[in-house]
Image (cartoon, rainbow, N blue to C red):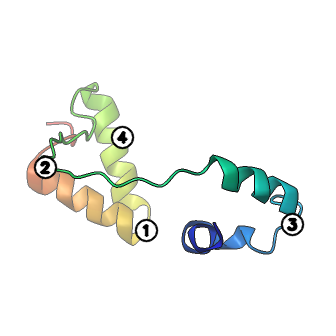
């Protein structure tokens, strides 16, 4: 349990008020490990292309102007793919 918390939510390790020992004990009893074999992945690009043109343009513009690298990268990708940019 500690390994999972350390990996995915390290801020909870020192948060005894959020995860007191009795709560952690209850969680341990409910956690079940399993493996899954993936043999196929199907995906769709959901970039707002089903939305109204004005909505697409607004989102695309906001991404371009946000100043965050991730937002700029997404806007660039959308423009490259011509998806969700309002055209």
9 relative to 37, above or below: below
29 relative to 58, above or below: below
- Quarter of the figure that contains the C terminus: top left
User: Label 3 neighbourhood size at 10 Å, few (<14), some (14-19), many (20+)?
Assistant: few
Asked where in the image residue 25 lies, by quadrant, the reply is bottom right
- Of the numbered discs 1 and 4, the one sitting upstream in the chain is 4
Q: Position of residue 68 (x, y in %)?
A: 43, 68
Which label belongs to residue 68?
Answer: 1
Q: Are marks 3 and 4 in contact (CB under 8 Å)?
A: no
- Of the numbered discs 2 and 1, the one sitting upstream in the chain is 2
Which label belongs to residue 58?
Answer: 4
Q: Which is in the foreground here, disc 1 or disc 4?
A: 1
Please, what secondary structure does the residue beneath circle 2 have? loop
Q: Which residue is mark 2?
A: 39
State how far apart marks 3 and 2 are (Cα).
Answer: 41 Å
Q: Are marks 1 and 4 in contact (CB under 8 Å)?
A: no
Q: Which is in the foreground here, disc 2 or disc 4?
A: 2
Please, what secondary structure does the residue beneath circle 1 have? loop
User: Label 1 neighbourhood size at 10 Å, few (<14), some (14-19), many (20+)?
Assistant: few
Q: Which residue is mark 3?
A: 16
- Of the numbered discs 3 and 1, the one sitting upstream in the chain is 3
User: Label 4 neighbourhood size at 10 Å, few (<14), some (14-19), many (20+)?
Assistant: some
């Amino acid at each position: 349990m500690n390994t999972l918390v350390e990996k995915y939510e390290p801020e909870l390790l020192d948060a005894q008020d959020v995860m007191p020992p009795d709560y952690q004990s209850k969680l341990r009893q409910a956690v079940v490990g399993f493996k899954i074999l993936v043999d196929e992945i199907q995906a769709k690009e959901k970039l707002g292309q089903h939305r109204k043109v004005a909505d697409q343009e607004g989102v695309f513009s906001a991404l371009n102007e946000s100043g965050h690298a991730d937002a700029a990268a997404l806007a660039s990708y959308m423009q490259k793919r011509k998806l969700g940019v309002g055209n």
